[in-house]
Image: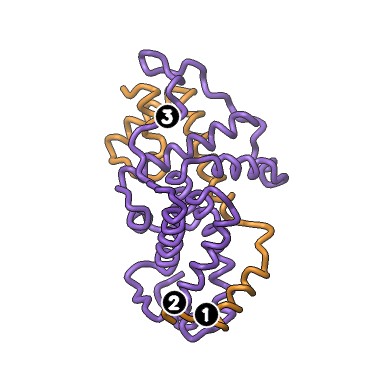
Amino acid sequence: MLSCREVAARASALIDGELGLAQRLRMRLHLAMCRGCARFVAQLRLATALIALAGGEEPGQDPSRLAAILDRLGHPEGGDGT
Amino acid sequence: MSPAEEAALVRRLAAGDGEAFALVWRRHNAAMVRVATGILGNRASAEEVAQDSWIAVMRAIGDFRGDCSLAGWIFTILVNTARNRAAREGRMVSFEETDGPDGLADAFDGRGRWRRMPALWEELTPERIVAGRSVLAHVEAAIAALPPGQRAVIVLRAQVGLEAREVCEILGISEGNMRVMLHRARLAVRAALERIA
């Protein structure tokens, strides 16, 4: 049987669906019997979901930066191969 | 975005369609600044690098052949621009991570069992996460504190959603290394959440 340390090391692979059938079953078996690891994997799943959420929005994106780029594109400076 | 939609978008960009540019800029600029900040270590330089990258993207868009995704191509330019600037400032940036702490070094006893059982995060409910920005702010701070490689992997793979293969090519790392970094980054975010749960 996998140790808790081994389960923790493979937790991301489990979440990402990268484990083969045998490995997945060994993980499931451990998780069914070990509350600590079940909680750990749930925590890592939450962390994974929140990481994706954190990238979803960025308040304070300054529209003037967009304008500055459009401005530079409209007036290409010489010497850089345009 | 389907390949056909992406091809249409690229054609609009190549034709100088400002609306198409604004769309792509809004979609990627924040993530570009985050990756560049990880590489350069400061936000002001990162903003400049992002802007220079956009100029390079728009000047070269006619050469984009769709061998990779548009996002992958844009982030290739961004990472190269940021690395070049870091090199000019005398900093060598390597994304490869071989050994390092994963935050769980002391979590297990000699037989590989939890020393202290992970807590049930009863307070960290989806409602609370949706209700306030504080939880996400914690996550963002934890990501900002990651080493450059982990930060780049997190943004490119988990946030921008690039294919694993593209992330590895852009950063010059192996797929195995990328998975290790992704795991370590998640462990770091989990540890940050543990402090507020």
Q: Are marks 2 and 1 in contact (CB under 8 Å)?
A: yes
Residue type marked 1: Glu
Label 2, label 1: how far apart the Cα atoms are: 7 Å
- In the rendered image of the structure, the colour used to display chain B is purple
Q: Image check: B53 left or right of B43?
A: left
Residue at which label 2 appears: A80
Can residue B28 be spotted in the picture? no
Q: Nearer the viewer, residue B85 or B7?
A: B85
Residue at (63%, 68%) from the top-left corner?
A65
Residue type marked 3: Pro
Pinpoint residue B55: horizontal percent, then vertical percent.
Answer: 50, 73
Question: Quick one: quadrant of the C terminus of chain B?
Answer: top right
Q: Is residue B79 above or below residue B197?
A: below
Mark seen at residue B101? 3
Q: Nearer the viewer, residue B67 or B172?
A: B172
> Mark 2 vs mark 1: same chain?
yes
Mark 2, secondary structure of its residue: loop
Pinpoint residue B9: horizontal percent, then vertical percent.
Answer: 48, 78
Mark 3, secondary structure of its residue: loop
User: Label 2 lies in what chain?
Assistant: A
Tell us which disc is closer to us: 1 or 3. Answer: 1
Residue type marked 2: Asp
Pinpoint residue A81: horizontal percent, then vertical percent.
Answer: 41, 79
- In the rendered image of the structure, the colour used to display chain A is orange
